Image (cartoon, rainbow, N blue to C red):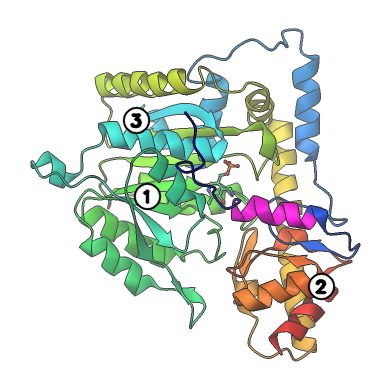
Amino acid sequence: GFYSSTIAQLPPDPMFGLKARYQKDPRDKKVDLGIGAYRDDSGKPWILPSVRLAENLVQNATDYNHEYLPIGGLPAFTAAAAKVILGKDSPAIAEHRVVSTQSLSGTGALHLAGEFLRDHYKSAGETAGETAPPLVYCSNPTWGNHFQVFGIVGVPTAKYPYWDDASKSLDLEGFLKSIREAPAGSVFLLHATAHNPTGMDPTPEQWKKILKAISDHGHLPLFDSAYQGFSSGSLEKDAWAVREGVHNKEYSFPGVLICQSFAKNVGMYGERVGAVHLVLPEHDATLNSAITSQLAKIVRSEISNPPGYGAKVVSKILTTPELYKQWEQDLITMSSRISSMREQLVQELERLNTPGSWRHITRQQGMFSFTGLTPPQVAQLEKDYGIYLLPSGRASIAGLNPSNVNLVAQAIDKVVR
Ligand code: PMP
């Protein structure tokens, strides 16, 4: 039977627990800097104009229906999604080295990748007869769900140094050391852009060093791409690290995994649009087909078929030139609003002479800022000012807007004094 003595009560998920407290808070000046979802200038969710247009086209098409998609997803979607991340002239795509399957957004992509690695990936150590299981190395800190997603499918994880608190920047030396010391064939999970939670991405020169070290030590890079277009506003620029890793012949990897989410950059959070792409080092039709069949088996046993609606809307955007242009514009709208909020927040903190330096907030990019606020300061912001952020000090900058940014700065000023 089911017993309360054996089924432990778990604490609420930190993010969704925060959201629940925010929703219950009766104060009208409350501010939600918790969840990583874009909000417009009036603090409201935003349906992208490109999405509205695509939804109309999809729903008004004569062949519109709600039939099952194929197990691997909508072929037009997965093919177009690969081009978004790898580039439309990607040699890897042209050489048929990319195996793609549709997933339940980015989380589902990571879950699929985890299961596939667990069952079908052999690290160098294992191939040589050792029993060391493959380990997925995640940045410290990282999106909290990474450990849970890999843990639940039985893939052990480890951490690599990433954030240097003292300098509020990347700990490149620690990162590289960890790459050198990990058992050959380990998996390194890399945030493709807009690192969550720090907002701090490596520079191109740093990326080259990181990728070279991963290649030299026989590891496999796994790019988690959940914010393409959110850092710079440009899909091309934000895919730089992934494309460098996949296309630069200086590196040789056992493969490159990409877990791609369209939740944020298309704003279809709840529709669960995503894909996994595995880029193989060389074309091998037999291997390609075997991998496709194994991914299909996992999908079939877990969800049978991925969801159709969001994939149809996104593939309409990706394959209709005018809509693609509108989408690029929408990404600029979102990313530039966020950068201007970073700037205003810091300006107000500087105007108030708030103790400490705050310029790291404008150096960071993407949805989040790792503010440097301590857990007690965060707790006080919530209690005294109705401002909600994660205890780590991570703030979703998308929650700021012209009517709350100064109030937030003033509250921060109070709690750090
Ligand atoms: N990876 C990272 C780093 C994220 O921040 C998120 C969203 N919070 C995801 C993956 C997955 O999001 P989703 O499943 O909504 O696509």
Task: Check if residue 206 falls in the magenta segment.
Answer: no
Q: Read off the residue under disc 3.
A: 97
- Residue flagged by tag 2: what amino acid is it? Tyr
Residue at the (21%, 56%) spot, across then down: 217
Q: Read off the residue under disc 2.
A: 385
Where residue 351 appears, x then y in whole percent?
Answer: 80, 88
Instruction: Determine the image quadrant of residue 77.
Output: top right
Residue at the (85%, 68%) spot, across then down: 404
Reply above or below: 299 against 226: above
Tell which of 42 and 365 is nearer to you. 42
Residue at the (88%, 56%) spot, across then down: 42
Residue 413 visible in the picture: yes
- Looking at the rendered image, the disc whose residue lies closer to the viewer, 3 or 2, is 2
Q: Read off the residue under disc 1.
A: 245
Residue at the (72%, 8%) spot, across then down: 63
- Residue flagged by tag 3: what amino acid is it? Arg
Q: SS class of the residue under badge 2?
A: helix
Whichever of callouts 2 and 1 sits on the residue coming sooner in the sequence is 1
Q: Residue furthest left?
A: 129
Contact (Cβ within 8 Å) of mark 3 with mark 2: no
Number of marks in the rendered image:
3
Lateral position of residue 180 relative to residue 147, left or right = left
Contact (Cβ within 8 Å) of mark 2 with mark 1: no
Where residue 318 appears, x then y in whole percent?
Answer: 63, 31
Extent of the magenta region? 13-22
- The kind of secondary structure the magenta stretch mainly shows is helix
The residues tagged by marks 3 and 1 sit, at their Cα atoms, a distance apart of 14 Å
Tell which of 283 and 91 is nearer to you. 283
- Residue flagged by tag 1: what amino acid is it? Gly
Residue 91 visible in the picture: no
Whichever of callouts 3 and 1 sits on the residue coming sooner in the sequence is 3
